[in-house]
Amino acid sequence: MKDQWYDKIFKAGSGDFDALALEIFHYQYENNRVYGDFVRALKIDPASVKSVHKIPFLPIRFFKSHEVKTGSYIAQTVFESSGTTGSISSKHFVKDLSLYEESFKRGFELFYGTVRNWCIIGLLPSYLERQNSSLVYMIDKLIHWNEHPQSGFYLDEFDKLAAILQELERQKQPVLLVGVTFALLDFAEKFSFPLKHTIIMETGGMKGRREEMIREEVHALLKKSFTLNTIHSEYGMTELLSQAYSKGEGIFTCPPWMKILIRDVEDPLVSVPRFGTMAPVTGTINVIDLANIHSCCFIATDDVGKLIDDGSFEVMGRVDGSDLRGCSLMLI
């Protein structure tokens, strides 16, 4: 049985997104104890919130210290962030996995077409080695729906992976190779051959395995090794149930039920609206993810970014002093 919010969430577009976001703000204020307490601590009257730019965004660190739930339920699963050694992991208490599946399937097909058209290969060793990764869950489901015989996960089987990629190239089979950054770089150091029918998508993440590199350096190395014009990227995190994708140059686009706002670096409670300017707006990234209806849709991340006039965005790095996290460890 589909959640009562499904139709509203996935029909959200440019016309009614803001109205639905405001409706959900009031709903979560009333039904999410952690978020409600946060708003009240800021002494904000919910009745005064009449624009998405006035919505308070919950700092992402609350997912480390609290059970962020809207309503009362026993979680179907709990996704946990990778973090770094000795750090506290974020936990996302997911009421309904089918809502997550609906979000990432719709999002994937919006950007890449039917799942069945692809052979999907996951090069995600650090994620496979731990439990409760939302990224592994997503790729595993895409592989399951895809049903291509060569789809699957690889740990350190670089020789086997190279042979399979070359065979798929001969077959002219579209391939999506999704990999954590350090593993893709390790693979690129060992092998170099042209990929004409394969998209490489990096998810970020050095995790202390290699020297930190900026995104442009990583992409340049991968493009050189595999004779590619572009490297794709995924922007997602444990605390979100939706993903944005970049098809090159590190410029990400959100699905219609997800939106990026920018807040002032000096004053985290102040959103920076565009006011019709064509120039990009730079600051710290706030995310509205309507698929987070059962946790919190309004997340203040620790990522610094640039919002472009068409609603796309670029991730420029991390706020000083914030934790380095699994899917976004590349700094600029």
Image (cartoon, rainbow, N blue to C red):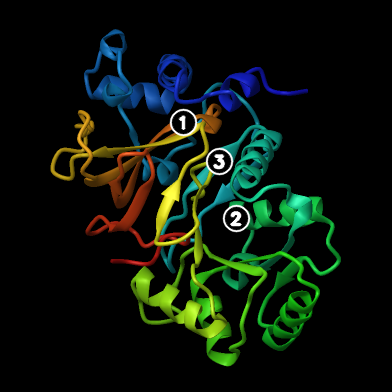
Please determine whether, in this image, residue 63 is positioned above or below residue 52. Answer: below
Which label number is shown at residue 241?
3
Q: Residue at x 63, y 43 (%)?
A: 104
Check disc 2 and report the residue beneath it. Answer: 135
Spatial separation of the CA atoms under disc 2 and disc 3: 10 Å
Q: Residue furthest left?
A: 266
Q: Residue at x 18, y 40 (%)?
A: 264
How many neighbours does mark 3 have within 10 angstroms: few (below 14), some (14-19), or many (20 or more)?
A: many
Check disc 1 and report the residue beneath it. Answer: 296
Name the kind of residue labelled 3 in the image: Leu
Return the residue nearer the eye: 86 or 283. Answer: 283
Please determine whether, in this image, residue 160 is positioned above or below residue 174. Answer: below
Q: Residue at x 68, y 22 (%)?
A: 3
Spatial separation of the CA atoms under disc 3 and disc 1: 10 Å
Image position, residue 195 (x, y; %): 63, 77
Spatial separation of the CA atoms under disc 1 and disc 2: 19 Å
Q: Quadrant of the C terminus?
A: bottom left
